[in-house]
Image (cartoon, rainbow, N blue to C red):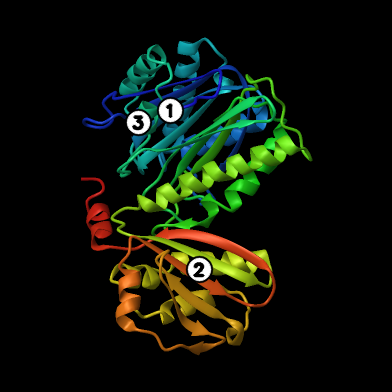
Amino acid sequence: MNIPKGFKFSGLHCGIKRYRKDIALAYSEKECVTSGFFTTNAIKAAPVLHNIQVLKENSENIRALIVNSKIANSCTGEEGLQNAFKMAKITAQKLHIDSRSVLVASTGIIGIQLPMEKVEYGIDAAVKKLDSDVISFAEAIMTTDTTVKISFRKINVPQEVILLGIAKGSGMIHPNLSTMLAFIFTDAKIPFYTLKELLKKSIDKTYNMIDVDGDMSTNDMVLMFCNGAANVEIKEKTAAYDKFSRALDEINTELAKKIVSDGEGASKVIEVRVANAPDEATAKKVARSICSSNLVKTAIHGADTNWGRIIAAAGSSQTFFSLEMVDLHISDGKEEICVFEKGKSQAFNEENLRRVLSSREIFLLLNMNTSNSSATAWGCDLTEKYIQINGRYKT
């Protein structure tokens, strides 16, 4: 695995969880230009509030990120805010850097205070273990995730630049950043406002287009760190910018799909593509509405051929479109079946459609036949196992 120049990582068990790794540290030898986007939930966890303030004051001088899992440090009042600050301060002291250059993330159960003695021990140990251990970092940020989520790209623009993405997310996933953490690291040099625009555009077509269960977390964030160690500057309106942007989109798309593929209890991945919509906003709303529908999710889980749920979900997107123009095709990547064309149901073989819907990956294509805008969203089925996982989440 290629790691961007100047970055180090560690992850370990400090006792917040019973057995598994629970604290992660990322460190840059050089100051990073950093941009962040955060949950749209009105209730924001202490680390989110901390990071918003830090980035407002110091977005071009970030050096480290400390993350804990198991406890979200959300709805924890003034003590929780102080604990987020303490995590940054302790990390800074151990690394001999400014506390205003440390960002914080937490994920897990809401409403519980962090065991700060264990956290402090963990930070000290994580600093001592810093190296190229990306896997341990990725493992330490997991909650109900069953697998690590890592993606990287190496591009030449013309010198070599590396992008590395690490994410976690399995439940409480819904469009507009919810229940996920994603961290992108690059050794490219990018001015702050260019970085902010790049990241926002990429988030809008990746993380903001996924759904697992329609619930929105208090802790979600996407952070991108650029330390410039490769001595390559990415400037707008250049070939390097376009190439870097494509690589960033590929990483975020890959991580977003890994999140829904690892959705709590999920057995199938659903890709919804809305094509030839009147505009991009309509395409996005319709695609996300279909992906977010529990009736669509449960039908696909049971390989139920009730395709009308898909059309109904499109109609509940609060957008206007002409049903008489709409086509709906369902595919498993090998076989494609048209069930609805120009506003009318089509004859099809029930057994063939049931076989298609029994596949691990399901592709829904809704063609609006109006203009040329399109959007893609990703989701997963909703299973009995999801209820089992969340019915005993705290226990």
Residue 178 horizontal side relative to residue 189, left or right: left
Q: Earlier in the sequence, mark 1 or mark 2?
A: 1
- Relative to residue 89, is residue 164 depicted above or below? below
Residue type marked 2: Ser
Q: Earlier in the sequence, mark 2 or mark 3?
A: 3
- Residue linked to disc 3: 140
Q: Quadrant of residue 284?
A: bottom right
Residue type marked 1: Asn
The residue lying at 69 percent from left, 28 percent from top is 158
Residue type marked 3: Ala
The image shows residue 146 at horizontal and vertical percentages of 30, 43
Q: Residue 289 shows which numbered tag?
A: 2
Residue with the most extreme front position: 334
Q: Residue 83 shows which numbered tag?
A: 1
Q: Between residues 127 and 284, which one lies in front from this camera angle?
A: 284
Point out the frontmost of discs 3 and 1: 3
